[in-house]
Image (spheres, helix red, strand yellow):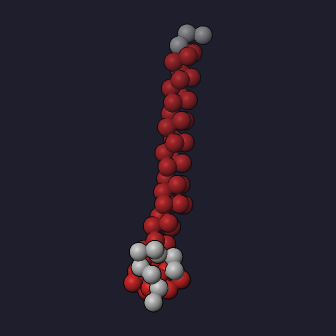
Amino acid sequence: MRRLLASRMKFHLLGAFLVSVGCATLYKFGVAEPRKRAYAEFYKNYDPMKDFEAMKAAGVLESAPPK
């Protein structure tokens, strides 16, 4: 029974560390990287002036009334 707590804590600390590293890796490659690629793809073809003109024509912007 001697050093039972210490040996169990080593085991569980190592396990918790490995699980947290695994979760962080899965999040990075499963969520963050695809999101980053999606944003890059969106802004590759995005025209802010076209979007501004569409909002202006729809009357969304008070500071730029439609013509």
Relative to 5, is 40 above or below? Answer: below
Instruction: Name the image quarter holding residue 44.
Output: bottom left
Instruction: Name the image quarter holding residue 15.
Output: top right
Q: Position of residue 54 (x, y in %)?
A: 49, 85
Relative to 38, is 7 above or below? Answer: above
Q: Residue at x 51, y 76 (%)?
A: 60
Q: Residue at x 55, y 16 (%)?
A: 5
Can residue 6 be seen here? Answer: yes
Q: Residue at x 48, y 60 (%)?
A: 32
Relative to 7, is 42 above or below? Answer: below
Q: Quadrant of the C terminus?
A: bottom left
**Residue in the foreground of this view, choosing between 20 and 66:** 66
Q: Position of residue 35 (x, y in %)?
A: 50, 66
* Residue extending furthest toward the bottom: 67
Q: Quadrant of the N terminus?
A: top right
**Residue in the foreground of this view, choosing between 54 and 23:** 54
